[in-house]
Amino acid sequence: MTSAPSCALLSAASLWLGSCAATAAATAGSTDAPPTPNVILLMTDDQGWGDLGLRGHPRLETPHLDEMARSGVRLDRFYAASPVCSPTRASVLTGRHPARMGIGGANSGHLPATEHTLAEELHAAGYRTGHFGKWHLGTLTTEVKDSNRGRPGATEHYSPPWEHGFDVCFSTEAKVPTFDPMVTPAREHGGVARGLVPGGPYGTAYWTGPGERVTEGLEGDDSALIMDRALTFIDAAVAEDRPFLAVVWLHAPHLPVVADPARARRFADRPLQEQHFLACLEAVDDSVGRLRGRLRELGVADDTMVWFTSDNGPEGSPESGLGITGPLTGRKRSLKEGGVRVPGIIEWPGHLAPAVTDVPAGTVDTLPTVLSAAGLPLPEAVLDGVDLGPVLRGESTERGAGMGFRHKGAEAWTRGRWKIHRKGDQPFTLHDLEADPGEAHDLAAQRPELVTDLQRELAAWSSTLRAPSGAEAR
């Protein structure tokens, strides 16, 4: 499908796309091209940077994710594009900051038809494409009441995944309970809207296509249900000998957070919501283990690039027990590090050597990195993401570009170890994130020239975005 990359990209040290011998054979006229990578994008919902066993969590065990981090590239400064979910999801699929497409917050705007998505680009290159789990980039029906914004005749924000390059879908508009997802849980599990009756319908459906609502087989752990469908999709793609893109966006551990009661009882010494939060994340880890095991069984693990991250930092207060940010301050809805720095792991066993990096990276980098790995051109659009290939291959210790954030009157800019941040018209603070990841010490007064330089970069970037409106302006 693509021409062979240069021998420089295929050095033994890079482990990126095979050996120089393979490239030489292709150049000499061989029809054997380097393997086209399968791609799996795993994302949790409201999982904190510290919500992993490898971070020294005091109660949570995540052996499968820990092993994935050890065998892959662990990105310790990986950022969601936004401290809330919908904007981050838009950035994954487009490589663009969500402000460029008018998605300022959750349940705000929708993914426009004019955007070039990763699914569309890979589908055009022959990939089988699937979306599984939470969509949150537009409504999925105009026929019935569904979730937050789906209504009969409501077409303004109708923008389902099957209109953005996905062949196979098992998708919800927004959140669902993380156990028995179609059933409203008891109110003590949180996130239960007014008018919903515990034990009654939750009001958010899984959809597989236009008018195709799933009505059976939706009992039990929601992460397992999503992974079941994703694995069926992967099995079919491998049987057809087709490369695949599987976007697996889990609802866990977003409120209402519910887990298998037997699993939750392992944490009986903790408050009820925390019991279910921890058990819910352990169920996520189990699903990741199933996925990694299936890839090995199918013989495609070495040729599959698997990403794992979260859409933003954890919900609630630090005292709630619902999410840990480690040394970072701030949580969901904040541009402090704890609101946007999230778990970041990329595993591609046949092509990337195990490594840990502090180079800033983020969800905006997904599209350019994946398309570059697949040997495909970037879409003709202004991208905020960069190809992380040189960092993942250990060829570079710099991102090569700054990274900007904007959310409801707050803005931030990070370049290298430095970050400026402010809310509203307050002065910018300056933090050295290598020495002070908790952003406890404002160095703006000591380094005014650096603040000016970073502020100038932020202003130049911001000038290319849409003006704040709607949910982002409030």
Image (spheres, grey):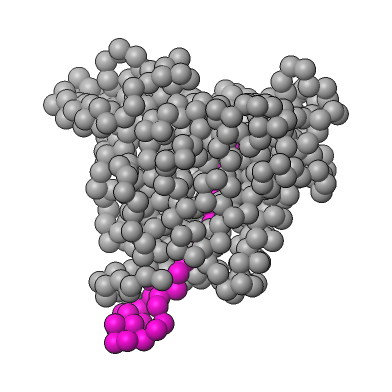
Residue displayed at 52% across by 46% down: 164
Residue nearer the viewer, 473 or 198:
473
Q: Quadrant of the C terminus?
A: top left
Relative image position of residue 51 (x, y in whole percent): 57, 40
Name above or below for residue 40 compared with residue 416: below
Residue 466 figure quarter = top left
Residue displayed at 31% across by 38% down: 403
Can residue 97 be seen here?
yes
57 magenta-colored: no
Q: Quadrant of the N terminus?
A: bottom left
> Is 190 left or right of 166, judged from the image as shown?
right
Start-end of magenta stretch: 17-45
Relative image position of residue 221 (x, y in whole percent): 75, 45
Residue nearer the viewer, 83 or 417:
83
> Is 394 left or right of 90, judged from the image as shown?
left
> Is 235 left or right of 473, judged from the image as shown?
right
Relative image position of residue 121 (x, y in whole percent): 43, 55
